[in-house]
Image (tube, rainbow, N blue to C red):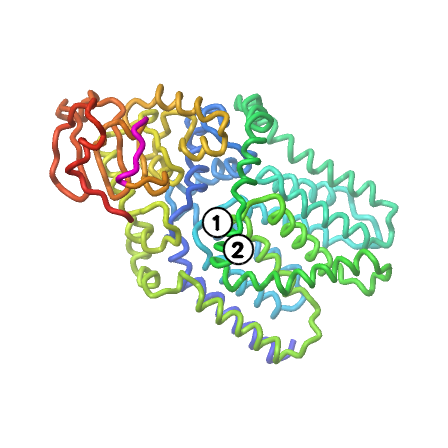
Amino acid sequence: MTDSAIVSRRTIGAGCVLLLLLLGPLFVCMPLNSDTALFDLQAERVLQGGVLYRDIVEPNLPGVVWIHLAVRPLVGWSSEAIRAVDLLIFAGIIFLAMRMLRGHRAGALFAFSATMFYLCCNEWCHCQRDTWMLLPAVSALLLRLRSGTVEPRRLQFAVLEGSLWGCAFWIKPHVAVPALIVIAVDTMLRQNRSGVIKDIAAVIAGGILAALPGIWWLIDSGAWPHFWEMMLEWNPEYLEAGRERQSPERWWMMIYRFHPWWIVHIVAVPLAWQAIRVAITVRDNIACDRTVSLVAAIYAGWLLQALILQHAMDYIHAPPIVLGLLLISSWPWQLDMAPRRVATGVFLCLALLAAPILNLQRLAMWPGCWSEGSSMPIRATLAHGTFPAWQQLSKVVDYLREQRVKDGELTCLNVHSVHVFRELRVQPATRYWCTLILQDLFKHRAAGIDAAVRRNTSRFIVTESLESGLTNDDSPNDFPWNRPVVFEAGTYKIHATNVLQPGPEDGQPLPIRSSDSDVQTELPNPTLPRTAIHDDVSSKSI
């Protein structure tokens, strides 16, 4: 290794350390997304003796819930803990991916660019299934690359590879697409194909072995029949609802949020096409770089399933960018080093300038992240999305905590209000953790969901007007908006489903309280029109 290469690698390594020191505390203290809050809620329900799918709805495979079940009792239930775990998982992905790269400088540059991308993403990209399943998938790819193309590999390694793909499948079945493309491309590259059938059979056997513990858990926990009910009877409507959500506007907004990282695909897609074409058409193995071909295969497969089978959601499209960076880093470039350095430097500078996390308001939270942790004000500042409004949501949580809300006494109407359950560490009144989104995804079951909420919610329902698409002058008069409001914080309202429910201490009816005022009044007659209840209560948009 030349002195200039050593200096370059050390410079990039120092940049990685600086990046982690600067953005690591901000990353750990960013708020959780609503999906992660739901995974926590589901895991805690199971730990309390509940049955997944029966006692709390989950339309997907249970792999991510298993991860929370394994991790949360060890690291605790704070948002900082699970985000630190997420960072460790991503570090594992980077470490394994770097072992596929030949040059130390290429590995260091990949680590820097991929880490910068992930740390600068919005909170919806973190602690998600798509990124977490990348860890076993990259492990499986690396294991395949360790075997040669001349002699058949040992079957135990093929079985282990299949088990890794199987673990990723439990997290999200879409991983089957890149797995199949990787196996197909590698089969074309093998000089001796006499053992290919045995190898593929061993990989399939490994996948079956990975399936068995999960099947046993589903049967032993009592979730097996409810799992199949969800997969066969609920999921077709769930998938159809997902396809209806596709729109040019959603794609455009996602491209805007990923700016300028979408440029990675402009470079990586032609490289993947060339690498796979050569692997399929050229019979001279010397002309093929097997590492590049298989990295191109997993990138192309992942990008295809993300574009064709999934939605325009940021967390779905973050892993393809990481794999695109890996492909670009592994490519045997023939360009001179000087223009490559200029192009890379310009792109990374542009990415840093465009990174939302690097604005001054968020950077100013760095000392507070060390002293306060992920407090509500810090979450509100570091959040990238509109929902939830953390400052107002914290007031809702504080009020409900004062009322000593217990398991089964609370319903949340809107999806982002699922954080209320996580913050209070209570379970929802029904298996429907948030009602509007589930009624939207499962339209034929909307009436049953509404009936269950009406029948089982014993104390409070939390609503939020912006998510519900409402204004102060445009609110329905049916349930739950026609129930008396006992607390308001911005666009959040807490409705009392039983106005005769006594207060926690004085035995008096619950008062109406607004977070904008210290004034409290007795609940009016619940038969009065809703507008009469709210004449003296202010509401402000967030």
Q: In this view, does 230 lie above or below 492?
A: above
Q: Quadrant of the N terminus?
A: bottom right
> Identity of the amino acid at label 2?
Ala
Q: Distance between the residues labelled 2 and 1?
A: 9 Å
Q: Nearer the viewer, residue 474 or 385?
A: 474
Residue 38 lies, in percent from the top left, at 43, 37
* Whether label 2 touches label 1, CB < 8 Å: no
Q: What element carries label 1?
A: helix
The residue at the point 18 percent across, 22 percent down is 502
Looking at the rendering, the stretch of residues picked out in magenta corresponds to 472-478
Chief secondary structure of the magenta span? loop
Q: Nearer the viewer, residue 469 or 164?
A: 469
Q: Is residue 498 left or right of residue 25?
A: left
The residue at the point 62 percent across, 60 percent down is 326
- Specify the quadrant of the image occupied by residue 290: bottom right
- Specify the quadrant of the image occupied by residue 394: top left
Q: Nearer the viewer, residue 439 or 301?
A: 439
Direction front: furthest residue = 473
Q: Residue 346 got which mark?
A: none
Mark 2 or mark 1, which has the lower sequence index?
1
The crowding category of the residue bearing disc 1, from other C-alpha atoms within 10 Å (few below 14, some 14 to 19, many at least 20), is some
Residue 24 lies, in percent from the top left, at 42, 59
Residue 523 lies, in percent from the top left, at 16, 27
In the picture of the structure, the residue carrying the numbered disc 1 is: 86
Q: Residue 91 got which mark?
A: 2
The crowding category of the residue bearing disc 2, from other C-alpha atoms within 10 Å (few below 14, some 14 to 19, many at least 20), is some
> Identity of the amino acid at label 1?
Asp
The residue at the point 37 percent across, 29 percent down is 427
Q: In this view, does 326 lie to the left or right of 119?
A: right
Look at the image and say whether residue 149 sits in the magenta stretch. Answer: no
Q: What element carries label 2?
A: helix
Residue 508 lies, in percent from the top left, at 13, 24
